[in-house]
């Protein structure tokens, strides 16, 4: 009976010690200001393209480039801004060479105080715009108003520097041409990225 009581006390002490370590780690994380920078790796569109001769054609993305910027404050919240541009290779079977989608987002970020890994969640809103030529998709596209959910998971490669992967789920939203409301493109989809975060 005494042996069991001793084992119980040891387990309880280890549990309390673990909780104290967790609290200390969380406090340490909460006391830092960090800045992050990242780039998009891929962009996939889930929406469809429709005009007078095409109905529900898939939108195939090409290369994407841009930047993600973030600033996290000591109370585990932060702000981000991002801008990236994605080439559209095809709508259905039609090849395109001069059409891009530009996206600007403003994000509210939440850092989760989890030891070992760095987890950030966020919500964003912004604008999308199709940039094309008169010989491809036209030049008079309205501006879209997407929202997004984002998540990133990082690991400290140095004491104050982490490397992270991110995923953005952009809401389904359809934009149309000013001169032809029947011509429309659904620009919802997903974006993956990579970046680094530096603590101060």
Image (cartoon, helix red, strand yellow):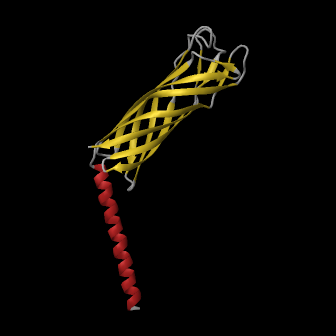
Residue at 35% from the left image edge and 39% from the top image edge: 78
Residue at 51% from the left image edge and 27% from the top image edge: 64
Q: Position of residue 110 (x, y in %)?
A: 39, 43
- Which quadrant is the C terminus positioned in? top left
Q: Position of residue 181 (x, y in %)?
A: 63, 14
In the foreground, 20 or 84: 84
Q: Is residue 142 above or below residue 174?
A: above
Q: Is residue 148 left or right of residue 158?
A: right
Q: Is residue 14 left or right of residue 65?
A: left
In the foreground, 42 or 14: 42
Q: Position of residue 9 (x, y in %)?
A: 35, 80
Residue at 59% from the left image edge and 27% from the top image edge: 61
Residue at 54% from the left image edge and 20% from the top image edge: 100
In the foreground, 200 or 24: 200
Q: Is residue 189 left or right of residue 110?
A: right
- Which quadrant is the N terminus positioned in? bottom left
Residue 143 visible to an observer of this rendering = yes
**Image quadrant assignment for residue 140:** top right
Q: Position of residue 172 (x, y in %)?
A: 58, 30
Q: Residue furthest bottom?
A: 1
**Image quadrant assignment for residue 135:** top right
- What is the count of numbered marks? 0
């Amino acid at each position: 009976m005494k042996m069991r009581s001793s084992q119980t006390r040891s387990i309880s002490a280890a549990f309390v010690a673990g909780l104290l370590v967790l609290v200390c780690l969380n406090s340490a994380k909460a006391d830092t200001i960090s800045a992050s920078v990242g780039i998009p790796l891929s962009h996939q569109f889930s929406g469809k393209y429709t005009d007078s001769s095409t109905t529900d054609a898939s939108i195939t993305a090409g290369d994407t480039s841009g930047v993600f910027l973030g600033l996290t404050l000591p109370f585990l919240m932060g702000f981000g801004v991002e801008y990236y541009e994605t080439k559209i290779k095809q709508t259905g079977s039609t090849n395109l060479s001069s059409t891009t989608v530009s996206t600007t987002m403003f994000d509210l970020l939440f850092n989760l105080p989890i030891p070992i890994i760095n987890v950030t969640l966020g919500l964003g809103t912004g604008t999308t715009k199709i940039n094309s030529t008169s010989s491809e998709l036209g030049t008079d596209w309205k501006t879209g108003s997407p929202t997004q959910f984002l998540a990133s998971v990082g690991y400290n490669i140095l004491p104050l520097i982490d490397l992270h992967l991110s995923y953005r789920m952009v809401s389904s939203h359809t934009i149309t041409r000013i001169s032809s409301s029947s011509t429309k493109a659904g620009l919802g989809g997903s974006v993956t990225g990579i970046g680094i975060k530096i603590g101060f």
